Image (cartoon, helix red, strand yellow):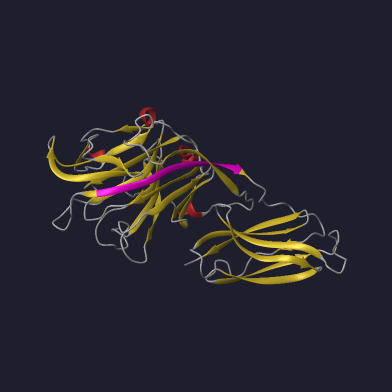
Amino acid sequence: MMKRYSTILFFALTVFTANLQAQTYTLVWSDEFDSAAVNTNEWVYEVNGDGGGNNELQYYTSRTQNSSVAAGVFTMKALKEFYLNKSYTSARLHTKKSWQYGKIEARMKLPYGKGIWPAFWMLGSNINSVGWPSCGEIDIMEMIGGPTTASGGDGRVFGTAHWNAGGHASYGLSYALASGKLSDDYHLYTIVWDATKIVWYIDNAFYCIISTTPAALSAFRAPYFIILNLAVGGNWPGSPDGTTVFPQTMDVDYVRVYQNIPTGVKENIAAPNECTLGQNYPNPFNPTTMIQYSVSEHLPGSQNREGVEVQLKVYDVLGNEIAVLVNEHKMPGNYSVQFNAASLPGGIYFYRLQSGAFVSVKKMQLIK
């Protein structure tokens, strides 16, 4: 959360090579907040009125007035009160553990209102030795309260990465609800992070991606710890005004960290006379696209009257199966099938053709 938007890198969306490995994720750490208080073996309270590097207005405390656990929910509370020369109090915590790569997510109900700034984010574990922004920063979720517009508000979430490129550099995008506020209900905020990219989601809907392969972004190939905080005021949201209601709360149902195990979905180079999988057209598309493929006459069993078994499936970037387009025996020949994605959120998807030992995967982009 030490930030403001600065340099936006145009290369950030140029990711995903031809090879694809779907991942199955194993839960390696979580806090379900099912105890009577914050587990201080896992979390550290940050107690200060330093302004978070952003001229924030609150004093962060470890008091139960500003954070508590009840009925499986961790609640952070921002209060309007005079405390140690500050006009507001709130809470900020970070994990004692750090992780390099994985799926990191939290299910939360956010606060609202002008000048309110909740965040679920990560900092490089080497911050004390290299400083910010050289340590790198991954903002999994930020919201700046107020009326929802193209630049923020109670219904818009931001995902951003920050690093040092001879000075502070950042890249990020946002996602706005179709209606309502993020305080109306719980939402799931997620990143999927590996050695080449970071991908952001809200409620499993993709909305931002950055390639971290350039040398300048090497900070994102190192361990990070997790931070939860509820700020009041600061350089980005500005100060609360007469419309801002206090207290404001951020409710956290859980925080979970998963790490991945490779599975068998990956691109293979086709041997001569094997099947082919064409690039979908149009690509990008909305809402339908056509996928062409061929079945080789040289595959074992292709000459019998039933043909060979063919599967054509669609996956999201997490490796979850989205649709089965073909799952039947086919005789040798050329085929096409239409994929209708009207019910899916925009983002990157992959389609995978398998027949016998032949496997081919290609990428497609749904624009909404």
Horizontal relation, residue 143 to residue 202: left or right: left
Q: Is residue 28 left or right of residue 355?
A: left
> For residue 177, what is the image quadrant?
bottom left
Instruction: Reply yes or no: does residue 274 show up in magenta.
Output: no
Q: Is residue 257 magenta?
A: yes
Please report the residue visible at 78 percent of the width from the left and 68 percent of the height from the top: 330
Q: Where does residue 184 sit, x and y in percent of width and height?
A: 31, 59
Q: Residue at x 29, y 58 (%)?
A: 154
- Secondary structure character of the magenta stretch overall: strand
Residue 320 position by quadrant: bottom right
Span highlighted in magenta in the image: 249-261
- Residue at the right extreme of this rendering: 304
Q: Quick one: 251 or 174, which is closer to the camera?
A: 251
Residue located at (32% from left, 62% from top): 150
- Residue 72 seen anywhere in this rendered image of the structure: yes
Image point (30%, 60%), residue name: 181
Front residue of this view, candidates 61 and 156: 61
Q: Residue furthest top?
A: 129
Position of residue 234 measured from the top left corner of the image (x, y, whole percent): 23, 46
**Image location (x, y in percent) of residue 207:** 45, 57
Above or below residue 230? Residue 124 is: above
Seen from the viewer's position, the closer of residues 147 and 163 is 147
Query: From where the camera sits, is residue 2 visible?
Result: no
Q: Quadrant of residue 122?
A: top left
Q: Is residue 152 above or below residue 254?
A: below
Percent position of residue 265, x then y: 66, 51
